[in-house]
Image (spheres, helix red, strand yellow):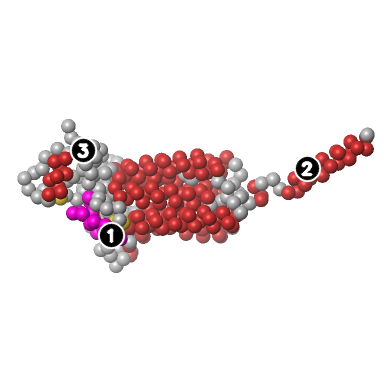
Amino acid sequence: MLAYINFPQWLKPEIIPGFPVRWYGLMYLIAFSIAYLLMMRQVKQKTLGFTEDDTLNCFFWAIIGLLLGARILATTVYDPSHYYITRPWLIFWPFRGGRFTGLQGMSYHGGVIGAVIATVIFCRVKKLDWFHFADILSAGIPLGYTFGRLGNFINGELWGRVTVKPWGMIFPHAQRFPVSADWVKELAASIEMKLPQSGLVNLPRHPSQLYEAFFEGVVLWLFLWFIIKRRKKFHGAVISFYLIGYGLVRFFIEYLREPDRDLGFVLQFGDAGPTPALFSSFLNFSTGQILCLLMIIGGVLLYFIRKKQTGGSFPSVEQPSKPQSSGTASHKNAIRKKRKSIK
């Protein structure tokens, strides 16, 4: 019995072989649809100060900003070859080598930055409360994000580090290693994996895309939707916990995900090990982890700044107004005086 799993051969990036329509693009559409439906559900449940038109328009610009930011950061920060920096007109060109490739390569952190910039500008122009809208949007984002990571899995990309766990998976396009290396022999022996006499071998890896889909997607959504959203005391609380929660979860999952081969570790204080594909130290940090740390810090600062700005409560328009309470008190006093006069 194999102590690892082979990537399903029937799972292909294209929905229909020969047609330039990929599961990854479809997963993006599903993700956007889920985020929009959850957002509209909140708008319809109670008066939030946004019309449905405002919500739809702001959501549209959020998507535009997300796509622009995700693509730009992926083709600049995550591309050390500087191919796109020297050819910026190709960043959004979906063809390469005469073939339709789509826009392969999107950065989550770039998407967050782009969406924030786009929605802040929109809310400023329309004179809407951005923190209010950000709370509504971020409460549903993780559930949609789940499908984005499933798209990564179907593409067989962004695989994890080498593992001996029984659910380790062999991804067909992952880096292979020389069978002559001692660590390769030891690892293969521990999972009873037969090695060829010479050449390279593909080793099982963590399906980190599925880890992220579950923890950054489903678990984080449940936390924000059923706990934070229901208990928040001021606008900006949900987006703060979203930044903190995603940053924390992604930071630790990055230890199981292989760093980008061309980038490696941004900060390295521990044992380098034979290869970055094999976990060796908690003191080595990838680009994704550094960006997640910035997310966590930003989320914490945002939470306390908004708490101080709002006094830890919603605006007075969402609470019973003072004239109503004073009117009730004066009505009670009038009743008391009337009773005394009758006596």
Q: Which of marks 1 and 2 is in front?
A: 1
The residue at which mark 3 appears reads as 4
Q: In this view, does 327 lie to the left or right of 207?
A: right
The residue at which mark 1 appears reads as 268
| Amino acid of disc 3 | Tyr
Of residues 314 and 86, the one nearer the viewer is 314
| Sequence-first disc among 3 and 2 | 3
The residue at which mark 2 appears reads as 328
Callout 2: helix, strand or loop? helix
Is there any visible trace of residue 267 in the rendered image?
yes
Residue 269 horizontal/vertical position (percent):
28, 59
Callout 3: helix, strand or loop? loop
| Sequence-first disc among 3 and 1 | 3
| Sequence-first disc among 1 and 2 | 1
| Amino acid of disc 1 | Gln
Q: Neighbour class for label 3 at 10 Å: few (<14), some, many (≥20)?
A: many
Range of residues picked out in magenta: 261-278
Q: Which of marks 3 and 1 is in front?
A: 1
Residue 121 horizontal/vertical position (percent):
51, 60
| Amino acid of disc 2 | Thr
Q: Name the image quarter holding the N terminus.
A: top left
Residue drawn where x is 22% and y is 46% of the image: 162
Q: Is residue 123 magenta?
A: no
Residue 97 horizontal/vertical position (percent):
23, 57
